[in-house]
Image: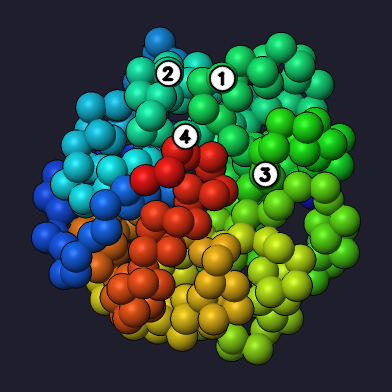
Amino acid sequence: MSSSHDTPPVDHTLCLGPRPDVAPASFDIPSGACDTHAHVIGDGVRHPYVANRSYTPPPAPEEKYLAMLAACGMARGVLVQVSVHGTDNRYMLDVLRRHPGQLRGVAVVNPDVPDRELAAMHAAGVRGVRFNVLFGGGVGVDAVDRLAPRLAELGWHAQFLMDVRRLPELAPRLARLPVPCVFDHMGHMPVAEDMQHPGFQALLRGVRDHGWWAKLSGAYRISEQFDHYDDVTPWAQALIEAAPDRMVWGSDWPHVAIPRMPDTGVLRNLLPKWAPDPAQRRRILVDNPQALYDFPAA
């Protein structure tokens, strides 16, 4: 089930870069709001890209990431190790160490990673490990059984980048893990599929019955309605209804490996459609990420 066997050869064509502008907020953003899913990307030289990557991105440096957070009204952020850097987490860790109160991280590691390396990552602010079933350069689901007991000792979670059309076959295995499971991009399943699809229903059962989490992110990756994404609204609302205390929001900046570049502010402004109640939005933006990523009380 490792992603390295499921992905096409690397595309060396440079991905689009993120837009410099961010649409203004359409709602009052609560104090302590958190963007739980974004990436920093090195220049490919000082921090090389892995050979088996599925795409080649432009750099997304620390200063541009922090500027995006501020423009989106986010006080806090979670960096997720990007697949093109493989298990070389150095750049992400450097950024985390420079912003200990503001940022947390999700790393990518091999199953034989030394305990001392995990301890150093925890001190830097890492609180989870990502398993990748979509893009080359990541560590696949086959590693989760070996790593999960070690993550549990640290109080970390397992994060999955996968199309949940594969989830029914994996769900019994994931339900037995001793750590919370977090699913990127609402399950990364095209909304052209019916919501009754066994994959999405497995995700709903997992967040409702097994304590799993979902990221309300990546609408542009699963929608057929670019720039307003109304077809995603029922899916987001179904997840929120199933587990309101285990939903978090993420921008997915800098939006790698896509043919059209979204406005990050427009993506943030989907939240009032998905969660019309301000108290619910506060849970998604403040309370839930505070619990999942071990932030100090806002």
Q: For residue 17, what is the image quadrant?
A: top left
The residue depicted at 41 percent of the width and 24 percent of the height is 100
At mark 2, the secondary structure is helix
Q: Which residue is mark 2?
A: 97
The percent position of residue 150, horizontal first and vertical second, equals 80, 31
Q: For residue 149, what is the image quadrant?
A: top right
Q: Which residue is mark 4?
A: 104
The percent position of residue 163, horizontal first and vertical second, equals 63, 63
The residue depicted at 19 percent of the width and 69 percent of the height is 27
Q: Is residue 225 left or right of residue 196?
A: left
The residue lying toward the viewer, choosing from 131 and 121, is 121
Of the numbered discs in the image, which one, if any, rests on residue 123? 1
Instruction: Name the amino acid type tagged 1.
Output: Ala
Q: CA distance from mark 4 to mark 3?
A: 13 Å
Q: Is residue 49 visible?
A: no
Of the numbered discs in the image, which one, if any, rests on residue 157? 3
Quadrant in which the C terminus appears: top left
Q: CA distance from mark 2 to mark 3?
A: 20 Å
Q: Earlier in the sequence, mark 2 or mark 3?
A: 2
At mark 1, the secondary structure is helix
